[in-house]
């Protein structure tokens, strides 16, 4: 299991598709696994949604993509792999349970990377409806500008026109030779772009917040979605109640798994609710649905001074265990937790006023601590977090208005259905 794909809420269920090799623990022969849930805690498995089609443009793999709903009919926009080619393909739901899918007969819907650009990678999709057109960004990179998102538009999802570079790393001093698995959405009046960064080192996921016009995204703040390098390729959806919820792939490798676990590799994260804080930073907390999974407390204890609590947990007797620590008074300066298990390294979590540090054995997992007041530099000027973040709110932009000729900027997330028309 790897990247979450095609997140959609349909007929009262959240459908989670994901990258999956049904024949082994190596990233080849990639298909789309499928599970659905009414509460994002208990999941029902379904048959594979997409598998490589011999002789087709996805014969070597059905890679990452998104779900969209034109005219009330769910579609999947995904990357089909055929030899060196990685190109956008389209499939339509053949039933209301989203179990069977029919590929568009003229896939791929984009014949190749945009001509005239020094493209080094071209794959993965995020799409939305704006005004009277569909838009999608394809992730990738440019030889001269690093990670990049390529913007396209279409009236029918089958014929796409190249618009231009939606954003590129070097234009804003951002990281990444390649930006893959893009996720573009709005929270309130803020446009959010999430990309997974490939730059030759450990891969990680980066968020950007800012504004967009009809052709280009301008990031005003950026940061990491997760301080470690496990959380990767996240994708999000807007629920019926307006919350934006994301899932991510938690990366593993078979060498670090205990013997009985080596029949599988990779797990999906718990759902995270996303929000933008007063500084313009993208934040998250556990989705409220997880509260309903709580059972009886295992133990409650007051720690005085430098005291400790020893608690034995069994991976066989519980699906998950939540640990809550509440400092009492103003004299607590640090809190540390050590998680020890059989045949694995200890996990240590240290929480101080400066942030959170997580180590696995001798390996530091956290790459950054809690963000402090910082400056986000754009060409020609310096901004503090949130400064001018909404200045362009009434100057057009990505539109989600269905009425031709009427322009408005991105509306609050509870009113948005950027993946639907």
Image: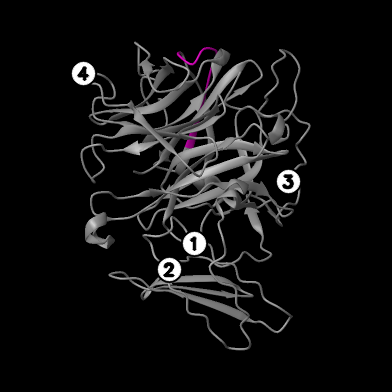
| Quarter of the rendering occupied by the C terminus | top right
Query: Comparing marks 3 and 1, which lies closer to the viewer?
Result: 1
* Cβ–Cβ under 8 Å for marks 1 and 2: yes
Is 159 situated above or below 265?
above
Nearer the camera: disc 4 or disc 1? 1
Pointers 2 and 4 in contact (C-beta within 8 Å): no
Look at the magenta stretch and give its main secondary structure: strand
- Residue 149 at x, y percent in the picture: 49, 36
User: What's the magenta region?
Assistant: 149-158
The residues tagged by marks 1 and 2 sit, at their Cα atoms, a distance apart of 8 Å
Q: What is the crowding at mark 3: few (fewer than 14 residues within 10 Å), some, or many (at least 20)? A: many
Query: Which of the image's four quarters has the N terminus?
Result: top left
> In this orientation, does residue 223 appear?
yes
Tell me the quarter of the picture where residue 244 sits.
top right
Foreground: disc 2 or disc 3:
2
Which residue bears the numbered disc 4?
55
- Nearest the camera: 113 or 281? 281
- Whether the residues at callouts 3 and 4 have beta carbons within 8 Å, the answer is no
Q: Which mark is residue 313?
A: 2
| Label 1 sits on residue | 321
Snapshot colouring: one colour
Q: Which residue is mark 3?
A: 389
Q: Earlier in the sequence, mark 4 or mark 1?
A: 4
């Amino acid at each position: 299991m790897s990247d979450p794909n095609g997140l959609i809420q349909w007929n009262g269920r959240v459908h989670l598709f994901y990258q999956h090799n049904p024949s082994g623990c190596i990233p080849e022969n990639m298909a789309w696994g499928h599970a659905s849930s009414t509460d994002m805690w208990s999941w029902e498995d379904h048959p594979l949604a997409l598998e490589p089609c011999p002789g087709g443009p996805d014969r070597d793999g059905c890679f990452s993509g998104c779900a969209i709903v034109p005219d009330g009919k769910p579609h999947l926009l995904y990357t089909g792999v055929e030899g060196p080619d990685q190109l956008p393909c389209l499939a339509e739901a053949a039933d209301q349970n989203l179990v069977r899918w029919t590929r568009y007969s003229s896939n791929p819907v984009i014949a190749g990377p945009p001509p005239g650009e020094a493209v080094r990678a071209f794959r993965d999709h995020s799409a939305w409806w704006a005004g009277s057109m569909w838009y999608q960004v394809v992730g990738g990179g440019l030889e001269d500008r690093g990670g990049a998102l390529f913007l396209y538009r279409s009236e029918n999802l089958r014929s796409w026109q190249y618009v231009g570079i939606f954003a590129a790393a070097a234009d804003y001093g951002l990281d990444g030779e390649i930006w893959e698995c893009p996720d573009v959405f709005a929270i309130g009046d803020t446009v959010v772009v999430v990309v997974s960064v490939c730059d030759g080192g450990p891969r990680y996921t980066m968020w950007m917040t800012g504004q967009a016009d009809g052709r280009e995204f301008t990031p005003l703040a950026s940061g990491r979605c997760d301080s470690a390098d496990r959380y990767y390729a996240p994708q999000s959806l807007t629920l019926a109640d307006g919350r934006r919820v994301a899932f991510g792939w938690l990366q593993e490798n078979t060498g670090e798994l205990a013997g009985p676990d080596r029949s599988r590799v990779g797990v999906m994260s718990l759902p995270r609710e996303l929000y933008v804080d007063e500084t313009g930073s993208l934040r998250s907390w556990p989705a409220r649905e997880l509260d309903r999974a709580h059972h009886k407390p295992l133990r409650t204890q007051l720690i005085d001074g430098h005291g400790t609590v020893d608690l034995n947990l069994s991976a066989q007797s519980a699906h998950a265990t939540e640990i809550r620590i509440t400092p009492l008074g103003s004299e607590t300066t640090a809190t540390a937790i050590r998680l020890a298990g059989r045949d694995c390294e200890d996990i240590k979590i240290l929480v101080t006023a400066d942030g959170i540090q997580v180590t696995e054995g001798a390996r530091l997992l956290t790459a950054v601590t809690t963000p402090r007041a910082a400056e986000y530099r754009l060409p020609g000027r310096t901004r503090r977090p949130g400064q001018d973040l909404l200045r362009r709110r009434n100057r057009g932009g990505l539109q989600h208005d269905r009425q031709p000729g009427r322009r408005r900027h991105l509306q609050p997330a509870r009113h948005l259905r950027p993946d639907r028309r």
